[in-house]
Amino acid sequence: MNELIWNYDTLDSLDRPILVVAFKGLFDASGSATSALEWLMEKSESEHIGEIDSETFFDFTQERPLIGFDKNGERTLSWPKNKIVAIKTNENERDLLAISGIEPHLRWRTFSELLVEIVNKSNAESVLTLGSMVGMTPHSRPLAVNGSSTNLELAERLNLEKPSYEGPTGIVGVLHDALDRSKIPVISLRVSVPHYVPDSPNPKATRALLRRFEQVTGITTEYEELDGPAADWQKQVDAAVASDDEITAYVARLETAIDEDENLLPSGDDLAAEFEAFLREQGPEIETE
């Protein structure tokens, strides 16, 4: 069974692509990570060029297919899928190849091997995974985006964290391991979502993730267009918090803690320049066997 289905002609036209991955599931609090990837698709010329077959990767009692009707009134059945999308960016910017969809339930090792194959076939020079996690961050402050890389040189040059977590992991951890063993540079960007409002759509978190993505890659995201929705979201949460004295006091303590924390990240220009220099220096060595 061919689990990877796509159009090679479109892949050939991509300019120095980066593969970007986000999944609905454990690492997508408030849907912020998948919303960021959908935003990138909508803001640039994009084409759905393939998908990873869902049959062997999903437990359909957990992620059920959907019955609906098409524009002609005919009943349709839609299965969960992870689609492959080519994104043409602005001139002189790297193009993107996106894997957008749902975290698979089964056969994670095989699924990760397919993503390594996608890197090979598309000649992607690096991979970025987008995620959002609940954290001890106040809604009233800029939402922190943590970056990490298992590539020690890349982590050092971009001032990213070096992963130190030990314990149970998810598909993103398995994917990073597969990419690292294949010597493919990979970066994880994760935005912290206030744990007291974890489920509602969060344009402020999506904006923060897109902003950091642009700083790291130099690829235009137009994240500023989310200024209005992010401000509206914050006002709504402000009103909800103000109605409860206990939560108000708790948020104030979070604000004090975050205000005392220093931001050690370099500027956006420095990040993008270092990222480009790193990829240029890797040359053909980043290709997998």
Image: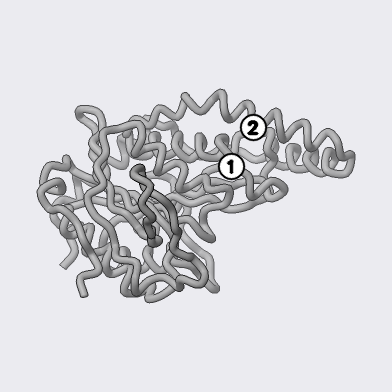
Residue 114 lies, in percent from the top left, at 26, 66
The local secondary structure at tag 1 comes to: loop
Q: Quadrant of the N terminus?
A: bottom left
The local secondary structure at tag 2 comes to: helix
**Residue 157 appears in the picture as rendered:** no
Side (left or right) of 289 relative to 22: left
Sort mark 1 into few (<14), some (14-19) or many (20+) by Cα contacts within 10 Å: some
Front in this rendered view, residue 182 or 85: 85
Q: Residue at x 48, y 65 (%)?
A: 63
Q: Amino acid at mark 1?
A: Pro
* N-terminal label among 1 and 2: 1
Check disc 2 and report the residue beneath it: 233
Residue 201 shows which numbered tag?
A: 1
Which quadrant of the structure image shows residue 249? Answer: top right
Which quadrant of the structure image shows residue 142? Answer: top right
Residue 118 vs 263, above or below: the answer is below
Q: Residue at x 32, y 33 (%)?
A: 218
Sort mark 2 into few (<14), some (14-19) or many (20+) by Cα contacts within 10 Å: some
Residue 135 lies, in percent from the top left, at 64, 51
Side (left or right) of 179 relative to 63: left
Residue 231 vs 108, above or below: the answer is above
Labels 1 and 2 touching (C-beta < 8 A): yes
Q: Amino acid at mark 2?
A: Trp
Residue 85 lies, in percent from the top left, at 27, 47
Which quadrant of the structure image shows residue 228? Answer: top right
**Residue 245 appears in the picture as rendered:** yes
Alpha carbons under labels 1 and 2: distance apart? 9 Å
- Residue farthest along the right direction in this orientation: 245
Residue 57 lies, in percent from the top left, at 37, 71
